[in-house]
Image (cartoon, rainbow, N blue to C red):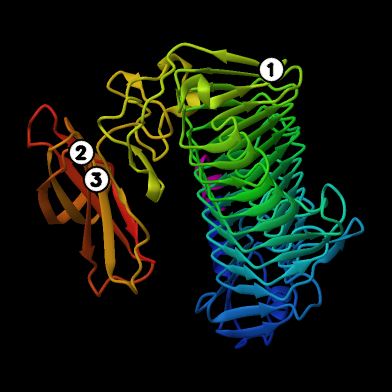
Amino acid sequence: MMGKPALGAFLLLLASAASAATIHVPDDFPTIQDALDAAMNNDVIIVRAGTYVENIDFLGKAVVLRSEAGPDATAIDANSAGSVVTFQSAEGADSVIEGFTLFNGTGTVHRNWLCGGGIYCVDGSSPTIRNNVIEKNIAEHKGGGIYCDSSSPLISGNRIGQNTITEARTLDHGGGGIFCNNSSAVIWQNTLTRNGVEGKTSHQGWGGGLFCRSSSLTVADNVIEKNSSCHAGGGIYVYNNTSSEPSRIIKNVISENSAFTGGGIVCGFASPLLVSNSIGRNSANWSGGVGLSYSDAAIYNCRIFENTASSNAGGLDCYESSPLICNCTFARNVAFDSGGAIYCCYKTAPEVVNSILWGNLAFKGSEIYLDDVPDTTLSISHSNVAGGQGGVYVGTGATLGWGQGMIDADPVFAAIHEQDLHLLHASPCRDAGDSGAVPAELAKDFEGGERIVDGAVDMGADEFHACLYLGGPVLASSGELELRLIGKPNATFTLALGSGVLDPPVPTPYGDFFLMAPLFPMVTCQLWADGFITFESNIPSAWQPGDRRPFQARVGDWGGSDTQFTNLLLVVVE
């Protein structure tokens, strides 16, 4: 008796699978929308190479729509007649669009505003948007590339660029690349570049790359660069996050963005979790790197470097905000007036611990500036501050809490002038932090290595350990590969390339071993006297863009007490 329901369910699954069809465009239907109109749930629509001039709507159907030849060969041109793609009928994760260039969209009217030039996603829709190029779309008000309202899409592996908001008018207008309102999107492994927001006036326009409003997003492993906003948040603007689950902004590269205030990222009335982000070379009039307003953000493991403010707050600005800043590195930020690394003004109480503030510049307060207004405070402990308290300006009425474990010493970065902020063995920041202050979210360091090694936490975003990493991008066209290795001074090492990756790795007394046989030993050598080495190699002509090549090194004589396997390094060829 128990077998009959199971058999019935099995037959139902077979019937469902049998009913699924594969539809080709233009073979079976001349347009993509014709194919979507005819499709049933679980169908797959494959689109041949070409440019299709139309606007499409998924109509709530659980279908996979993908190109046959990829986004460079297959495009949907909206012809300036609305959004390129629409999800407005509660589509789920099994509604998939993949492998298209989506361009020339102009948006859809939503609550009196034009939104979503490239993709318009509303009313409980949660589609999968992956591996597309979403570019050269516009919307007057919200979401030049993608607009999400009350939706939870997965947005992964896309190139989202050169999308524009043309006339931002109110505080909730912007998002040149992506705009999310009241949503729980996952935004993962995308590139958002050269998106922009233009405002009705110079004080309107927010979130050049991404605008997160009243939402709980996961924004992870993205490159967000060269975006701009006429007012705030050149890279990211997070606003009015009242959700019990704050947005999580993790392991993103946020670089070369610009705005009037907050070149890299702005958090206003929102307290997201910022972990292991690289926030560098952004620019603004005020708050070159990060701007906080009415925010108690948690900022962990972040590198905030070479940001520039033409007035105040080169690295980080706090206004009526009390963030926790743990294991961060502020280096070479510049403010032409006040606060090279950190600027605080009015009802602030940030707590800084286990961090490095080094080589920052400003006319007043090269490392920290506390403004001449009441209720401006900052507490710092177990950190390395250039110049000690001489690098801090404390205004009348402001309060500096200079705690235990403070040092003023060269942190001994690997190559600060090349933005390489790894610690070398001689760094006084090694084992100098307060392990008891490390929150649970900091089990790993900036690159994913163990956060606490040798019994005590280091200062800064990087934890010293044997580490293998790239010195720059690997371009198939250049034929060159630069690797860098850090370990104990003068230690021998053997570098190998594997034919694949073992998952799970093989545990050894010397660390996890990841490389799949056959192995290709590349070099056996000795680290320099400072425990750092850079070496270059020609890459094989057979390596193609998109290839992933696994490397790992063993540092120390085999079987010795100092023997370690480094991290796995997956080199992605571009």
* Region of the chain picked out in magenta, as a range: 1-8
Q: Position of residue 316 (x, y in %)?
A: 61, 36
Q: Which residue is mark 1?
A: 398
Distance from the alpha carbon under mark 2 to that under mark 3: 8 Å
Q: Residue at x 72, y 55 (%)?
A: 229
Residue 74's place in the image compared with 489, above or below, is: below
Q: Position of residue 549 (x, y in %)?
A: 28, 59
Q: Position of residue 57 (x, y in %)?
A: 75, 69
Horizontal arrangement in the rendering, residue 565 relative to residue 13 (left or right): left
Q: Which residue is mark 2?
A: 531
Residue 460's place in the image compared with 500, above or below, is: above
Q: Position of residue 281 (x, y in %)?
A: 54, 50
Q: Secondary structure at mark 3?
A: strand
Q: Secondary structure at mark 2?
A: loop
Report crowding for label 3: few under 14, some 14 to 19, many 20 or more residues within 10 A (C-alpha).
many
State which mark lies toward you, 2 or 3. 2
